[in-house]
Image (spheres, rainbow, N blue to C red):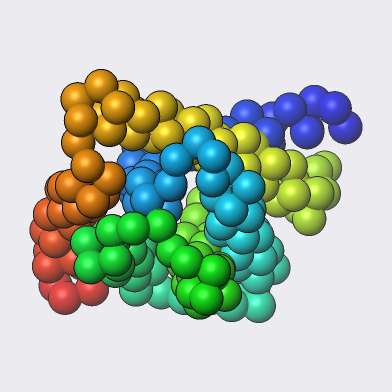
Amino acid sequence: MLESFLKFLELGLYHIVSFSSYDHILFVVLLTLPYVFKDWKRLLILISVFTLGHTLSLLLGVFGIVNLNVNVTEWLIPMTLFFAALFNIFSPRKPTDNRSYLMLGIVMFFGLIHGLGFANAFQTMVSANENTFLSVIEFAVGIEIGQLIIVFCVLFLSFIFQNIFRFSTRDWVMVSSAVILGLMLPLIIQSPLFS
């Protein structure tokens, strides 16, 4: 049991911190950019809501309740990053309390999309003698840890750029988000969905 837990925890962790899943890293970066270290509680809630959405849709996909065409999910994932980047560009300050529920809903929806994109691959990782439900939960713990590592790195970089290099928060958020938006455009336009 411990062996299975460690296996899926590690898979979840490397699902996030691996550069092969850079889309997930970039989404966490976009979520984190408007915040600073003192906002860690609000950021932890956002990251956990994303993990919850990712886990729910992964469960729905693994158990065959929701089955979305791979090309559709592969197009929707960069679209989530595109819209998150646009949100940061047009609203570069950290979200205020009156927009918190809207932001939580958006993050949950994006988590659902990202989880559906991984459901097929996850099924191949679970062996016959492993409990699928528990494996998804263990995987989610790894994802959460991986996301927290990325959040810390982004907050640290934000601190350096804003306090040592004197970037304004607005410029830091807008420029970083614009770069990510630019990276997503080719993925959206050249999607297999349109081939």
Residue at x 20%, y 30% (from the top left corner): 166
Residue at x 54%, y 46% (from the top left corner): 39
The reply, left or right, for residue 108 in relation to residue 24 is right
Where residue 100 sits: x, y (%)? 54, 70
Give above or below for 67 relative to 147: below
Where residue 21 sits: x, y (%)? 38, 42
Residue 194 visible, this angle: yes
User: Who is closer to the viewer here, 186 or 164?
Assistant: 164
Residue 77, located in which quarter of the rendered image? bottom left
User: Who is closer to the viewer here, 112 or 157?
Assistant: 157
User: Who is closer to the viewer here, 92 or 113?
Assistant: 92
Where residue 129 sits: x, y (%)? 82, 42
The reply, left or right, for residue 9 in relation to residue 94 is right
Location of the N terminus (image quadrant): top right
Give above or below for 115 relative to 150: below
Give above or below for 181 relative to 67: above
Exactly how many numbered labels are in the figure? 0
Residue at x 36%, y 46% (from the top left corner): 33
The reply, left or right, for residue 114 in relation to residue 181 is right
Residue 71 visible, this angle: no
Residue at x 62%, y 35% (from the top left corner): 145
Where residue 104 sits: x, y (%)? 55, 69
